[in-house]
Image: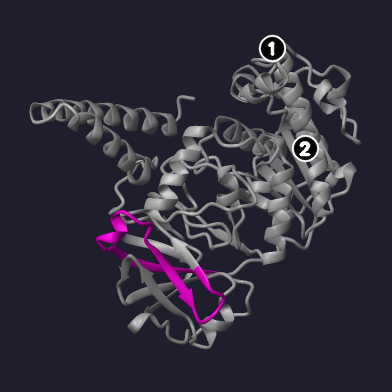
Amino acid sequence: MDTRKQQLLKRHRKRKRVTLLVVLLALLTTAIWAWWLPPLLAVLAWVAHEAWFCDHLFYVPSSDYEYHLPSAERHALQAEGGRIPVVQCALDGTETLLLQVNLRSGLLGRLLDPAVRIEGGVADCQAFERGVRGVRYLNLTGQAQALAAGQLRLAGRYCRLAPHVELLVLRHADYLSGPMMVIAPHADDAEIAAFAAYSQADSWVVTLTAGEIENEYYRAAFALDLAEAARFKGELRSWDSVAVPRWAGVPAAQCVQLGYFCMQLPAMQADPLAAVPSREAQLADTRPFRRFNEVSLQSDADGQPTWSNLVQDLRELIERARPATIVMPHPTLDPHPDHICAHDALQQALRICQWRPQTLLMYANHLHDNDRWPMGDAGTGVPLPPLFDATLPLRPWVLDVAPEKQRQKAAALGMMHDLQPAAPAKRRLRRWLQRCLAARRWPAFGDNEFFRKAVRRHELFWVGTLNDEREPR
């Protein structure tokens, strides 16, 4: 995965190795005073690392987030004592509301997660990076009534807020009113990003890959070899992709698994007519992972895992479903190669389609710069993610997720086999140290990190643009 994300990770690991070497040399010198001092200090240093310094944060927390939001209405406000004054604009509760604030971490905010408590409306607490200092964007979507009444108050936890703030109001059409199609590169991507959205619309959920790789758990649990474990995991995740959306009311005939192979989409894209087999399952046929589908596709005739078949599948499904809104990964914000390819295949399919959707909504289940985002606890709001490109025009749309819908989303994630295995022992020990020393919490309803990151009171999307270039059919 030679993406910017991987380059940042390599740089992070290189710096960590240099730091560890310096620490090791320092520890060895302490043996001059006592032989037992180096091992004791080594254990303390490891505990400090696990509790406070192990986050993958590939930017300086004192950097301003840089966003270009050209369609936002802006209202400069003065929040004296944390109280947001009455806003002189019409709000009906359907808008996406963001508040640009300037935060400065306190001393404790370098060891404990700084956050902003939102009071007076729907109680919320949105967390940021340790050592935060600069411009950030709170998510006030769902707080329109309290904001219009001048009842909203902000309070910093381990950080201070500058009194000058700016409210950004983005008005949107009702994207849930027409048919919706969610494009998921892997089983669980649709649920992580858009469960609340697709559960409130007449939806199709289309999953591109079987997600058969990284199957160590199944090899150990069932004493399988690599190929057997890959096929077994692929079958389980294929079932998940067509069964779990039914929990949200999606008809079985509108849940489709295309059966292509995980992490092979870039190779397929590079040579559109070449059949690219699974890395681990010893398969070069998509049909074994399509056996739960209730719809048939033209490519079922040969089952060839080619890019041209993938694009044809998407074109065929779009013309059948005729969605008003298509939801897919964001090609710039989400660095996962399969997610980027899913976006590219969808755009290519749209160029040969007879049907044109009205809206594209894009999501980012992964980020380049921060593996922990959205930070903070499950059930809290989702502020805008780190971004440092003021040349990229963006139009965020936020769906407010009620507590009942959050519970349903947590249950849907719990049905996904890939999110069920317990965390490794090292991660469980790290979480225990962070809970004791850094006051971090994880939800009781799921061990996987996505239970914390995805079960929130907001789902965040980015409104995309349709490419009007059409290819002859």
Q: Secondary structure at mark 1?
A: loop
Q: Is residue 99 magenta?
A: yes
Q: Residue at x 53, y 88 (%)?
A: 149
Q: Is residue 358 above or below residue 23?
A: below
Foreground disc of the pair 1, 2: 1
- Looking at the image, residue 268 sits to the left or right of residue 11; the answer is right
Q: Is residue 222 above or below residue 436?
A: above
The residue tagged 1 is 225
Asked which quadrant contains residue 349, the reply is top right
Magenta span of residues: 96-124
Density class for disc 1 (Cα within 10 Å; few <14, some 14-19, many ≥20) is: some
Q: Amino acid at mark 2?
A: Asp
Q: Which residue is mark 2?
A: 240
Task: Indicate the quadrant containing the C terminus: top left, top right, bottom left or bottom right.
Answer: top right
Q: Is residue 391 visible?
A: no
Compute the Cα span from label 1 to label 2.
22 Å
Q: Residue at x 54, y 83 (%)?
A: 146
Report x, y in % for residue 253.
90, 42
Of 235 and 324, nearer the camera is: 235
First-in-chain label (1 vs 2): 1
Give the residue drawn at x 34%, y 54%.
130
